[in-house]
Amino acid sequence: DAGITQSPRHKVTETGTPVTLRCHQTENHRYMYWYRQDPGHGLRLIHYSYGVKDTDKGEVSDGYSVSRSKTEDFLLTLESATSSQTSVYFCATQGNTGELFFGEGSRLTVL
Amino acid sequence: RKEVEQDPGPFNVPEGATVAFNCTYSNSASQSFFWYRQDCRKEPKLLMSVYSSGNEDGRFTAQLNRASQYISLLIRDSKLSDSATYLCVVNSGFGNEKLTFGTGTRLTIIP
């Protein structure tokens, strides 16, 4: 399995507070992704990165920002969390054959 | 119409039976197709890619029908360990930012 770790794994926060989720990989994969998964929806792409300092928006990027200062780390920030951002967040990297490897997920609850 | 549609199930199937489910996609320009497996409260993992000529991996067979725009997954001799949600994934472009995930089909194998 690809070495992808997410932190924190669980977080409960209040509306209006900032939240940062971290994704760390040990595979030296170039491409990294942040998805959210909600009931009734497939995984939806928030932001992705194709290299250090190279990022772009996905399908549901409003309210989120990302940063990638090192190959191994991809941070997702909610500047001011809202209840609609309660979700399970998955980080993924792309392997050499195009396969996506996912982290274990971060469960975020915004009260 | 959703870009990728799956029957959510649940499919409750006795152990040893054969089960099949389909996934339809709307973009005729879609380039590549995958089945991922997701266990309850876990991350998705690649089950198999779907090739134009169809492909088989042990008890699992995946097929693509471009004319009717669907992919299928067949599981033979089902095992209890096959219980999971199966996600259909379609890539409508040449990068993983174009990946669209279905909402998944839930399969439960009954002893």
Image: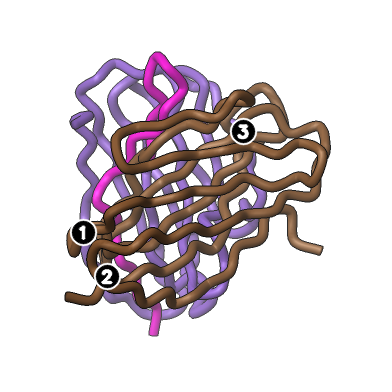
What chain does badge 3 belong to?
Answer: A
Rendered hue of chain B is brown
Q: Do marks 3 and 1 both belong to one polypeptide chain?
A: no
Q: Do marks 2 and 1 both belong to one polypeptide chain?
A: yes
- Left or right, B45 with respect to A100, comes to left
Q: Which x, y percent locates residue B39?
A: 27, 60
Which mark is in front, 2 or 3? Answer: 2
Label 1: state its secondary structure.
loop
Quarter of the image holding residue A17? bottom left
Circle 2/circle 3 CB separation < 8 Å: no
B31 drawn magenta: no
What chain does badge 1 belong to?
Answer: B
Mark drawn on residue B109: 2
Circle 2/circle 1 CB separation < 8 Å: yes
Find the distance from the CA under tag 3 to the CA under tag 1: 41 Å
Q: In which quarter of the image is the C terminus of chain A?
A: bottom left
- Total labels: the figure holds 3
Q: Which amino acid does label 2 sit on?
A: Ile
Q: Which x, y percent locates residue B68?
A: 79, 46
Find the distance from the CA under tag 2 to the CA under tag 3: 41 Å
**Mark 1 or mark 2, which is nearer the start of the sequence?**
1
Q: Do marks 2 and 3 both belong to one polypeptide chain?
A: no
Mark drawn on residue A56: 3
Q: What residue type is labelled 1?
A: Lys
Region in magenta: A92-111
Mark drawn on residue B40: none
- The residue shown at (42%, 74%) is B11
Query: In the rendered image, which residue does mark 1 sit on?
Result: B79
Q: Identify the chain drawn in purple.
A: A
- Closest to the observer: A93 or B87? B87
Q: In this view, does B6 lie above or below A97?
A: below
